[in-house]
Amino acid sequence: MTEKEVRDIVKSVLRSQMSEIPNKSEVKAIAKEEAEKSAKKISNDTLTKKDVKDMIKKTMYAYHRWMWEKKGMWIDQI
């Protein structure tokens, strides 16, 4: 093979490989799509402020109820 034939083969391979690389606008679209998917996934997993307040209320209620029952057991033993 001559040097020219080798260069032509390399050029054709490079052109075919370069055509598969996305351009700037395609990269932006892909990034935006992935960001939206991630945001939706995260929003489903996060707790709202109301959920956190309710969780704290339930925990405190359970704690105070447990302490009340424990106090009742102590008083019964006296």
Image (tube, rainbow, N blue to C red):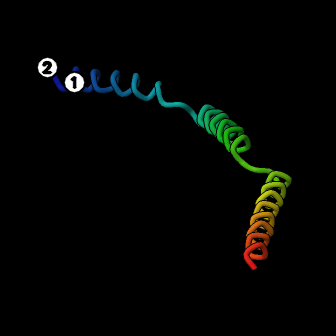
Looking at the image, which residue is at 66% across and 36% down? 37
Amino acid at the residue labelled 2: Met
Local crowd size for mark 2, using a 10 Å CA cut-off: few (<14), some (14–19), many (≥20): few
Looking at the image, which residue is at 57% across and 33% down? 23
Residue placed most toward the observer, 38 or 24: 38
Residue 14 falls in image quadrant: top left
Q: Is residue 24 above or below residue 9?
A: below
Quadrant containing the C terminus in the rendered view: bottom right
Looking at the image, which residue is at 43% across and 29% down? 18
Residue placed most toward the observer, 14 or 48: 48
Residue 73 falls in image quadrant: bottom right
Residue placed most toward the observer, 58 or 48: 58
Q: CA distance from mark 2 to mark 1?
A: 7 Å
Residue 6's disc is: 1
Residue 54 falls in image quadrant: bottom right
Residue 44's disc is: none
Q: Is residue 56 above or below residue 1?
A: below
The image position of residue 75, as x and y in percent, is 78, 76
Total marks placed: 2
The image position of residue 11, as x and y in percent, is 33, 26
Task: For mark 2, give the secondary structure.
Answer: loop
The image position of residue 64, as x and y in percent, is 80, 67
The image position of residue 3, as x and y in percent, is 18, 26
Q: Is residue 73 above or below residue 10?
A: below
Local crowd size for mark 1, using a 10 Å CA cut-off: few (<14), some (14–19), many (≥20): few
Query: Which residue, given by chain and number where applicable, does mark 2 sit on?
Result: 1
Badges 2 and 1: C-beta atoms under 8 Å apart?
Answer: yes
Amino acid at the residue labelled 1: Val
Seen as rendered, the residue at the extreme right is 50
Residue placed most toward the observer, 11 or 48: 48
